[in-house]
Image: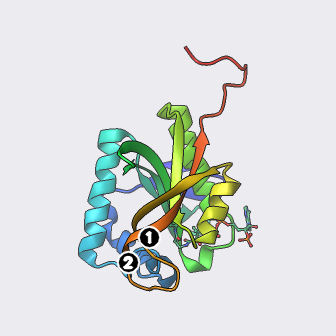
Amino acid sequence: MRLTPRLRLEPISPRHAHELWLLHQDDHIATWYGGTWSRQTAADAARTWGQGWSEDRAGKWLAYQQDTGELVGRGGLSYTDVAGARRLEIGWAIRRPFQGQGYATEIGRAGLALAFDHLDAPDVIAFTERHNQRSQAVMRRLGMHYTGQILRPGLVEGHHQIQPEAPFVLYTVQRPDPPNGHAAT
Ligand SMILES: CC(C)(COP(=O)(O)OP(=O)(O)OC[C@H]1O[C@@H](n2cnc3c(N)ncnc32)[C@H](O)[C@@H]1OP(=O)(O)O)[C@@H](O)C(=O)NCCC(=O)NCCS
């Protein structure tokens, strides 16, 4: 469990399958993840992300408002193959009533802190469909930079079905230099 200024972040494990399902009934989230999730899809994701925490020490959180306890969204880290390399990726999804309040960026900051302060990652990537401008705005707020385009299963602007080779933009942020300016040995 981790606290950010406004959120309580709980590492996702199989016991969160119901809340994950609930999150993916939100139309504004479902649009970007192949439609509303079934209970089975949510249970599979909860198990996979739970394994991420136990095997890689990197995983995704469910985010709750500290003051109300309401479920805000999810986000965090996972390892993903991109162009044949295993990369540490960060992502986020926020329920519609909580969008536009800086929560995705708050989760993103917690994810980058985990990556750089605890996992000693050299860099972190994020990617999203070329027309997902709101997600790219989060990447830029986190200090990430555009580093190219990749093709993955996803949405093509103007189509509602997942396409096998949709254009995604790739953003990257490097581990910051240590404050004293010397590389760690
Ligand atoms: C992508 C997504 C997570 C972005 O969420 P978001 O709420 O726009 O992003 P943030 O949490 O960073 O919020 C930023 C906005 O909150 C505003 N804000 C309000 N209070 C704030 C605060 N205290 N701190 C920071 N920002 C604040 C910012 O000004 C900004 O407003 P703007 O969008 O009008 O410029 C969201 O649109 C979403 O869940 N989409 C569906 C799922 C999805 O696409 N996921 C990504 C797949 S790759």
The quarter of the picture where the C terminus appears is: top right
Secondary structure of the residue carrying tag 2 is loop
User: What's the mark number on residue 162?
Assistant: 2
Choose between 111 and 71: the one closer to the eye. 111
What is the C-alpha distance between the residues marked 2 and 1? Answer: 8 Å
Give the tally of numbered discs. Answer: 2
Task: Identify the residue at horizontal 38%, vertical 83% (top origin).
Answer: 161
Residue in the picture at 58% in, 73% down: 131
Q: Which residue carries the number 1 mark?
A: 166
Q: Amino acid at mark 2?
A: Ile
Can residue 9 be seen? no
Of circles 2 and 1, the one toward us is: 1
Label ID, residue 118: none
Q: Position of residue 129 (x, y in %)?
A: 51, 68
- Give the residue at x 52% y 58%: 149
Dot 2, crowdedness within 10 Å: few (<14), some or many (≥20)? some
Between 129 and 39, the one nearer to me in the picture: 129
Q: From where the camera sits, is residue 118 visible?
A: yes
Q: In front here: 144 or 16?
A: 144
85 left or right of 144 in image: left
Q: Is residue 28 above or below residue 46?
A: below
Mark 2 residue CB less than 8 A from any atom of ligand 1: no
Q: Helix or strand or loop: what does disc 1 sit on?
A: strand
Residue 77 pos. (x, y %): 45, 50
Which residue is at the far top?
185
Q: Are marks 2 and 1 in contact (CB under 8 Å)?
A: yes
Looking at the picture, how far across and down is residue 105, in whole percent?
Answer: 64, 58
